[in-house]
Image: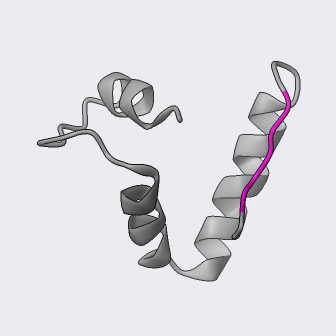
């Protein structure tokens, strides 16, 4: 949901908007330990601002 906002702030250019399935495909290429570290840090950062729900289906 925040991919376009993040990529604009991070100065990362994508030729098109990334769909949720495209983001999932990118995440599959990242080792489990790094994904887990990312989610832990992201949850800690976001917890004071909003709820975080992760759909793992």
Q: Residue at x 37, y 49 (%)?
A: 19
Label total for image: 0
Quadrant containing the C terminus is: bottom right
- Where in the figure is residue 13, as x and y percent of width and height? 18, 37
- Where in the figure is residue 21, as x and y percent of width and height? 43, 61
Horizontal side, residue 14 vs residue 34: left or right: left
Q: Nearer the viewer, residue 31 or 2?
A: 2
Vertical relation: 12 (above or below) 48: below
Horizontal side, residue 51 vs residue 9: left or right: right
Residue 53 belongs to magenta span: yes
Q: Residue at x 43, y 37 (%)?
A: 3
Vertical relation: 22 (above or below) 43: below
Of all residues, the one furthest to the left in this rendering is 15
- Where in the figure is residue 9, as x and y percent of width and height? 37, 23
Of all residues, the one furthest to the top in this rendering is 49
Secondary structure mostly taken by the magenta-highlighted segment of the chain:
loop
Of all residues, the one furthest to the front in this rendering is 57
Q: Quadrant of residue 8?
A: top left
Residue 6 belongs to magenta span: no
Q: Residue at x 80, y 45 (%)?
A: 53
Q: Quadrant of residue 37?
A: bottom right
- The segment highlighted magenta reads 51-55
- Where in the figure is residue 50, as x and y percent of width and height? 82, 23
Horizontal side, residue 42 vs residue 13: left or right: right
């Amino acid at each position: 949901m925040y991919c376009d906002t993040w990529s604009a702030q991070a100065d990362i250019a994508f030729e098109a908007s990334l769909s949720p399935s495209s983001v999932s495909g990118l995440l599959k290429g990242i080792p489990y330990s790094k994904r887990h570290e990312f989610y832990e840090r992201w949850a800690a950062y976001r917890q004071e601002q909003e709820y975080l729900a992760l759909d793992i289906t």
